[in-house]
Each structure stands twice: as structure tokens, then as C-alpha cells.
Image (cartoon, grey):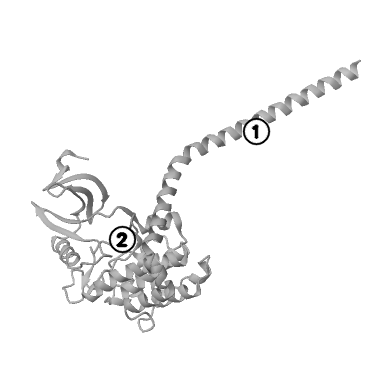
């Protein structure tokens, strides 16, 4: 890391954890309070107005399932948002190592995400970019959603031109992929996709590029989650299917409705123990990641060892055959 970015205001930078055109993400220590935080720096392609709008929107949302926003400030031409640091993993990492999830585990995570999105919707804010990398699960078993970078208030001015597509193609609703006006139900469709991926271990739509994925989201049918789910949970499949209806009339009208169906599926006994279940899930993934790192090299050595044993066996057989031939020749000559 360059020396000139060791400090940003009152924050000592620990590490860069993300970098792109939209933003740079750091972990840092807030020196006066000795608190670890995440700092998001405005990227080259981001507008100052949009960046400030993200800070204002996210700071207005106080909820146990939403990453807290602590501060917004600028130094010269650079702008920064200070966010709560969550020690744990994002959902994409957990899906990579553990999917497909048990239906109960998937429903528990999605129920927590729904509570966060319901709070945003109650404050007339659309997230517009719900995806596994924006869903964090702490080592304590808490689920929080982050990154309101493309979020928009229903009554706030639109900072993107008409027909502009925002969000991540794999997790877009059909209306979002077409660049049409979004509603609260657009977020619900994205919730359905994330739940689909947790349960099946696969995305419902795939393609070689963003345009190909968007085209499938708009016009293609996705494989039935019931057939891809190794546990074949009919009830959870119905929740996913209803959340992912292309028709707004047939889709869940509110996140509250989806949350209610998830709670009925989970049962209150499991909801009470949710943090224990999610702690175990996080712990398993951390263990798998460590084991993968430790085991990789010894695995190669074992392969070489096995290869050398086979070569030795071949040499022994050749020597045995040569000895037998020599013995037969001597026998014939005598």
C-alpha cells in the first residue's frame, strides 16, 4: 500500500479490501474511538451527488439487519463513507463452499434479509442491487445487508437516464433488465433469485456476458428449483417461484408477504435459535477454507509418491521377466 494513503483524516488504514471504478473499500481504525470500520472512497466513475445520496439514504436506515453508516466527509476532491465493520463472511463465499444449503438454513438467512429490505421499503427506499456479495453473515450469526450504492428513494430524483440499467444482471428482475421503471416488487424478485441460489447452488440464469444474461432474465424460463434442490422442498420452492414471477400481479406484492411465508416454513422454534444455526454455518465455511489452504500442497506430494510406486513396480516386473528369459535360454542351450 502507498504511504500517502496510510491515513485518511482520523482513520488509520489497515487494508484495501475492494477496488473498482465505483469505489475503493478499506478497513481502518477510527483513532479517537479505537474502533475498526470500513471506509468507502468515491471511485473515478462515481458522481459526488450520487455518492452523497448513498450516504444519506443508508444513514437514514437504522436496523439490526442493515450495516450501519457512521459518517460522511470529504477531503479535497475525495469523498468518503464510513461504515460498520462486520467480522464474518459474505453470502457469496458461503454459497461457494456450502451450497446447496439445507432449506431451513436458506430460509433463515432469507428471512433476515427480508426484514432488512422491509425496513428499507417502509422508508420508501429500493435497494436495486440485492446479491450474495452484499449480504454479510457475522461470526456471531447476524445477517446484515450492505451497499446502497444504487439504491433510490421512490420520491427522490432519478440520477440515471431513462432506459439505463442499474444493478447486477444475474440478480435483476425482468423490468430491471429492460430498463423500465422499478417498484418495490423488483427487489422481491432479486430476493427470490438469491434464495434460489442458496437452495440449488446454481444461478437461475446464466450466459457468456451481461447482455446474454439480461436477455434470459427478460424472456426465458428458469429451471424449476424443486428439481435442482437436493432436499426437494416443495414449500420453499413455492416461495421462490412466487417471488420470481415475471408478472407483477402474480409476484409477492410486499416483502412482508414473503417474510410471513418464510416464517411459517421455518417455525418459531428455529427462528429463536437462528443465530446458533448461522454461527455453525459460518464456522463450517471458515474451517473448509482453512483446510483447503492446508491440504492443497500435501495432496500433490501424495500424487508424486503414488506415481513413483507404480514406476518401481514396472521396473521390478521388467527385471523379473528379463531373469526368466535368461533362465530359459540357458536351459535350452544346456
Determine whether 239 is above or below 139 in the image.
Answer: below
* First along the sequence among labels 1 and 2: 2
**Quarter that holds the N terminus:** top left
In this orientation, which residue lies closer to the viewer: 52 or 140?
A: 140
Q: Residue furthest left?
A: 76
> What's the residue at 21%, 76% (across, down)?
154
Q: Is residue 205 visible?
A: no
In this orientation, which residue lies closer to the viewer: 17 or 159?
A: 17
Q: Residue furthest bottom?
A: 249
Q: Which residue is mark 1?
A: 310
**Quarter that holds the C terminus:** top right
Q: Position of residue 235 (x, y in %)?
A: 47, 75
Figure label count: 2
Q: Which residue is mark 2?
A: 134
> What's the residue at 61%, 30% (across, down)?
308
Where is residue 214, by image quadrant?
bottom left
In this orientation, which residue lies closer to the viewer: 163 or 245?
A: 245
Check disc 2 and report its element: helix, strand or loop: helix
Where is residue 203, by image quadrant?
bottom left
Compared across the picture, whether 228 is left or right of 111 comes to: right
Crowdedness of circle 1 by 10 Å Cα count: few (<14), some, many (20+)?
few
In this orientation, which residue lies closer to the viewer: 275 or 285?
A: 275
Q: Position of residue 57 (x, y in %)?
A: 18, 67
Q: Position of residue 278 (x, y in %)?
A: 39, 60
Q: Position of residue 94 (x, y in %)?
A: 40, 56
Amino acid at each position: 500500500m502507498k504511504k500517502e494513503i496510510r491515513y485518511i483524516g482520523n482513520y488509520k488504514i489497515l487494508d484495501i479490501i475492494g477496488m473498482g471504478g465505483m469505489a475503493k473499500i478499506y478497513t481502518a481504525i477510527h483513532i479517537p474511538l479505537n474502533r475498526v470500520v470500513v471506509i468507502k472512497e468515491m471511485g473515478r466513475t462515481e458522481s459526488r451527488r450520487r455518492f452523497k445520496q448513498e450516504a444519506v439514504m443508508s444513514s437514514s436506515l437504522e436496523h439490526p439487519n442493515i450495516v450501519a453508516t457512521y459518517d460522511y466527509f470529504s477531503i479535497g476532491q475525495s469523498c468518503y463513507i464510513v461504515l460498520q465493520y462486520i467480522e464474518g463472511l459474505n453470502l457469496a463465499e458461503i454459497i461457494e463452499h456450502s451450497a446447496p444449503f439445507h432449506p431451513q438454513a436458506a430460509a433463515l438467512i432469507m428471512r433476515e434479509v427480508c426484514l432488512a429490505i422491509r425496513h428499507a421499503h417502509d422508508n420508501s427506499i429500493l435497494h436495486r442491487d440485492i446479491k450474495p456479495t452484499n449480504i454479510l453473515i457475522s461470526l456471531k450469526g447476524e445477517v446484515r445487508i450492505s451497499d446502497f450504492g444504487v439504491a433510490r428513494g421512490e420520491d427522490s430524483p432519478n440520477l440515471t437516464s431513462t432506459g439505463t440499467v442499474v444493478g447486477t444482471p444475474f440478480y435483476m428482475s425482468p423490468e430491471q433488465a429492460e430498463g423500465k421503471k422499478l417498484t418495490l416488487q423488483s427487489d422481491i424478485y432479486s430476493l427470490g433469485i438469491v434464495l434460489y441460489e442458496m437452495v440449488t447452488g446454481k444461478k437461475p440464469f446464466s450466459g457468456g456476458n451481461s447482455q446474454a444474461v439480461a436477455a434470459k432474465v427478460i424472456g426465458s424460463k428458469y429451471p424449476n428449483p424443486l428439481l435442482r434442490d437436493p432436499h426437494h422442498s416443495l414449500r420453499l420452492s413455492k416461495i421462490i417461484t412466487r417471488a420470481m414471477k415475471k408478472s407483477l400481479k402474480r409476484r409477492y406484492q410486499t416483502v412482508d408477504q414473503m417474510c410471513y411465508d418464510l416464517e411459517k416454513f421455518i417455525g418459531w422454534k428455529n427462528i429463536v435459535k437462528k443465530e446458533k444455526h448461522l454461527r455453525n454455518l459460518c464456522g463450517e465455511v471458515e474451517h473448509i477454507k482453512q483446510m483447503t489452504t492446508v491440504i492443497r500442497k500435501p495432496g500433490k506430494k501424495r500424487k508424486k509418491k503414488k506415481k513413483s510406486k507404480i514406476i518401481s513396480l514396472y521396473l521390478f516386473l521388467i527385471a523379473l521377466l528379463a531373469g526368466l528369459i535368461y533362465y530359459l535360454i540357458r536351459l535350452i542351450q544346456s
